[in-house]
Amino acid sequence: MLATVRELTTRYSPCEVLHFDVEPEAVTVYEYPYGPDELGMPLADILKFVYFSPVLRFVLLPGGGSYQVQRICQYPGLEGWIPLETSPDLVALVTRFAPHIGQESLVDFWIEGEADF
């Protein structure tokens, strides 16, 4: 799962500085909003001081047949991970959501099965 998420997120995300954290049943994607061009320094130097923010998490659901993508939410009362979409196709989930990392469009995706507030 890590290899798929890392390869596709790196390919499709507009953010250049990403970090991946692996849990037994999940991969969390972290972002840093500024790249080498914006900061005028090489990536190796950026990584010395960067603070990554969690942005997406891809979770293998119990039973192992489906994945769920979640985004971090910091709206008061809803802090934490909110589910966006569930699918048996991890590649489809990553390619749909990775282009929105670091973009305001990511907040347009709301809790799966619920109307926007």
Image (cartoon, rainbow, N blue to C red):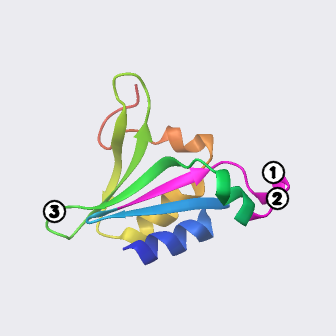
Mark 3 neighbour density, 10 Å: few (under 14) some (14–19) many (20 or more): few
Q: Which residue is mark 3?
A: 62
Mark 1 neighbour density, 10 Å: few (under 14) some (14–19) many (20 or more): few
- Residue 15 appearing in the image: no
Q: Amino acid at mark 2?
A: Met
Q: Looking at the rendering, in which quadrant would you find the C terminus?
A: top left
Mark 2 neighbour density, 10 Å: few (under 14) some (14–19) many (20 or more): few
Identify which residue is drawn at 41% across, 72% down: 2
Residue 32 % position (x, y): 62, 50
Q: Is residue 33 magenta?
A: yes
Identify which residue is drawn at 59% across, 68% down: 10
Q: Which residue is mark 2?
A: 41
Pick whichever of labels 3 and 2 is earlier in the sequence: 2
Asked if disc 2 and disc 1 are in contact, CB closer than 8 Å, the reply is yes
Identify which residue is drawn at 35% across, 37% down: 80
Q: Quadrant of residue 75?
A: top left
Pick whichever of labels 3 and 1 is earlier in the sequence: 1
Q: State which region is magenta.
A: 27-43
Residue 100 % position (x, y): 57, 52
Nearer the viewer's eye, disc 3 or disc 2? 2
Asked if disc 3 and disc 2 are in contact, CB closer than 8 Å, the reply is no
Q: Which mark is residue 39?
A: 1
Q: Which mark is residue 87?
A: none
Label 1 SS: helix
- For the residues labelled 3 and 1, the Cα–Cα distance comes to 42 Å
Identify which residue is drawn at 62% across, 45% down: 103
Q: Name the residue nearer the viewer: 94 or 10.
A: 10
- For the residues labelled 3 and 2, the Cα–Cα distance comes to 43 Å
Q: Please give the count of numbered marks on the rendered protein.
A: 3
Q: Looking at the rendering, in which quadrant would you find the N terminus?
A: bottom left
